[in-house]
Every structure is written in C-alpha cells, then in structure tokens.
Image (tube, grey):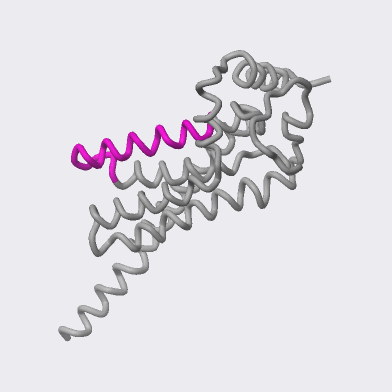
Amino acid sequence: MMAPIEQADVWLFRLLNHDLVHPVADDLMVFLTNGRLSWPVFILVALFIVARKGRNAFLLIFFALLAVGLADFVASGILKPLVQRIRPCFALDHVRLLIHQPHSYSFASSHAANSSAVAAVTWIYFHRGVLVEKLFTALMILYALAVSYSRIYVGVHYPGDVLAGMVIGTGSALFIYLLFSWLLKNIIQPRQMRQGNSAHG
C-alpha cells in the first residue's frame, strides 16, 4: 500500500499527464523535454554571459558548468541508484508516454536539476541587473519550469521527481556560489593582497 505522499504524487501525475493535456501541447512538450535542446540553450546562456560580463565571463561559465555537473551527479549518480524508483510509464497503467524512454530510474529528475541549476546561476548574477538582464533571468526561469513540467507531461517522471530535481539544481548553484565566494574572500583575495604588498615592499 502506497504512503499518502506517494498517493498524492501519483494522483497529481495522472492529473497532469492524462487530464490536463491538449494535442497542441504534445509537440511542444516533446520538444522541450528533448535533451538535444539543452545544448543550444546552454550556448545561448554562455553567449549572454560573455556579452554582459566581458573578461569575467569565463569564470562565471565555469561556475555554471560546475553547478550543472554537481546537480546531475546528485540526481543521476547518487539518488537514482539509491532510491531506485520505477518511472511512472513503467509502474502505472494508462500513462500517456510521448517519447521513447529506456528503463532507468525516476527519482530525481536530472532534466529538472540541470535546467534549474542554469536558471539559478542566471538569477544569482543577473536578477539585480539592467532590464535586459532581468528579462533574460525571467526567461531562463520559465525555461527551467517548462522543461521540468514537460517531464511529467510526457510520462517519464512523477511531480515529486521533478520537484526534487529543481531543489537539487537550485541548491547546487547556491552551493557552488557560496564555495566560490568563500574561496575568493578567504584565499584568493588575501593571496593577491600579500603579493601586491610584496611587490611594493
């Protein structure tokens, strides 16, 4: 017998995958959930960072790649083999499966984790910027939400998988940001100051 939380997860999955659907949305959701779409989006983010941050762009891009790598590792490398949750398309009857899906585990969604990590990095560095930066931040958040929702719509993830992935992606970005900030404040800047004092001494 399923626990109440799992029952609610299944109920919400059926609502989003079977009831709140429309043929017009099917193609859009398949397009959004396609992993090949991720690279053009990441390249667009990288180009935007270069255009807005100049010489500091490459460090920020490296930071974004670390955040995505950490999010993907936690979701796919740790949680999926640890939890071993069967995907809804293989565990439930009458699922609308819109894509080909190999037999891999469901919890947590790496698509949601990775897209949320990119959105979180964008928010951290651009949400207080000029209008174009705020608009780009909003666009990346909407993209992450759409990708995450599409995983439920096409039948390969429960809402709980997606929510966990979003938390992992956002948390990974914040962790890497705090780590970078600590290293900059406590190691890199003091070392630069010592080198500068030595040069003038």
Verify whether residue 133 appears in magenta. yes
Q: What secondary structure prevails in the magenta region? A: helix
Using the image as rendered, state which of residue 129 and residue 139 is in the foreground.
139
Using the image as rendered, state which of residue 6 and residue 189 is in the foreground.
6
Q: Does residue 58 appear to the left or right of 64 in the view shown?
A: left
| Residue at the extreme top of the image, as rendered | 19
| Residue at the extreme left of the image, as rendered | 200
Answer whether residue 191 is visible to the viewer in this image.
yes
Using the image as rendered, state which of residue 69 and residue 148 is in the foreground.
148
Q: Position of residue 201 (x, y in %)?
A: 17, 86
Above or below, 122 relative to 164: below
Q: Position of residue 151 (x, y in %)?
A: 59, 33
Q: Tell me the magenta residue range.
A: 126-149
Q: Does residue 117 appear to the left or right of 20 in the view shown?
A: left
Question: Which residue corresponds to the image point at 59% horizontal and 26% vertical from the top-left?
Answer: 153
Q: Position of residue 10 (x, y in %)?
A: 70, 21
Answer whether residue 171 is visible to the viewer in this image.
no
Q: Position of residue 138 (x, y in %)?
A: 33, 34
Image quadrant where residue 164 sits: top right
Question: Which residue corresponds to the image point at 54% horizontal and 42% vertical from the top-left?
Answer: 113
